[in-house]
Image: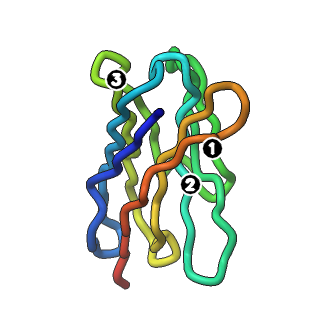
Amino acid sequence: QVQLVESGGGLVQAGGSLRLSCAASGGTFSSYVMGWFRQTPGKEREFVIAISPDSSRTYDAAFVKGRFTISRDNAKNTVFLQMNSLKPEDTAVYYCAADPSTGFAYWGQGTQVTVSS
């Protein structure tokens, strides 16, 4: 069973930066597409960004607009989300997810990101 644990969330002022980490255990991390999603109360969970197993490709949502970067370290079973130029509307719980080629089947517990204006 794959377990994902996010860390790095917190409170930051608008315009600031945060780096989230997601450590994976179990499964074969290096074969998974890894992604980040976010959710705010009363809204559906939305896709943020994802990265291919070999880091050759990334995919991001339109609202990212170059502000966020995803990376991974397969030797350490960890994926990162670097978020720059944060806006109050980026406030959400951020979730890490793993796709073993059948869809995002494994999820972390989430980490809160709060951006103050």
| Residue ID at (30%, 56%) | 18
Q: Which numbered mark, 1 or 2, is in the foreground of this view? A: 2
> Left of 51 or right of it: where is 91?
left
User: Which mark is on residue 60?
Assistant: 1
The reply, left or right, for residue 75 in relation to residue 45 is: left
For the residues carrying marks 3 and 1, which lies nearer the camera in this image?
3
Residue under the image location 41 percent in, 40 percent down: 3
- The residue tagged with tag 2: helix, strand or loop? strand
Q: Amino acid at mark 1?
A: Asp
Image: 59 above or below 65: above
Query: Is 8 situated above or below 89?
Result: above
Q: What amino acid does circle 2 point to?
A: Phe
Q: Nearer the viewer, residue 25 or 63?
A: 25
Q: Residue 34 appears at what percent x and percent y?
A: 53, 34
What is the spatial separation of the Cα atoms under label 3 and label 1, in whole angstroms? 19 Å
- Residue at point 56% right, 68% down? 39
- Separation of disc 3 and disc 2 at Cα? 19 Å
Give, as a three-letter code, the residue at label 3.
Answer: Asp
Q: Measure how far apart labels 1 and 2 are at the Cα level.
A: 10 Å
Where is mark 2, residue-wise? 37
Q: Secondary structure at mark 3?
A: strand
Q: Which residue is mark 3?
A: 73
Q: Tell me the number on the disc at residue 94.
A: none
Query: Closer to the camera, 110 or 49?
Result: 110
Query: Residue 101 vs residue 1: left or right?
Result: right
Label pair 3/2, CB-CB below 8 angstroms: no
Q: Nearer the viewer, residue 32 or 10?
A: 32
What residue is rendered at 52% in x and 48% in y?
A: 107
First of labels 1, 2 by sequence position: 2
Q: Quadrant of residue 86?
A: bottom left
Residue 42 position, x and y percent, is 64, 83
Badge 1 marks a residue whose secondary structure is strand
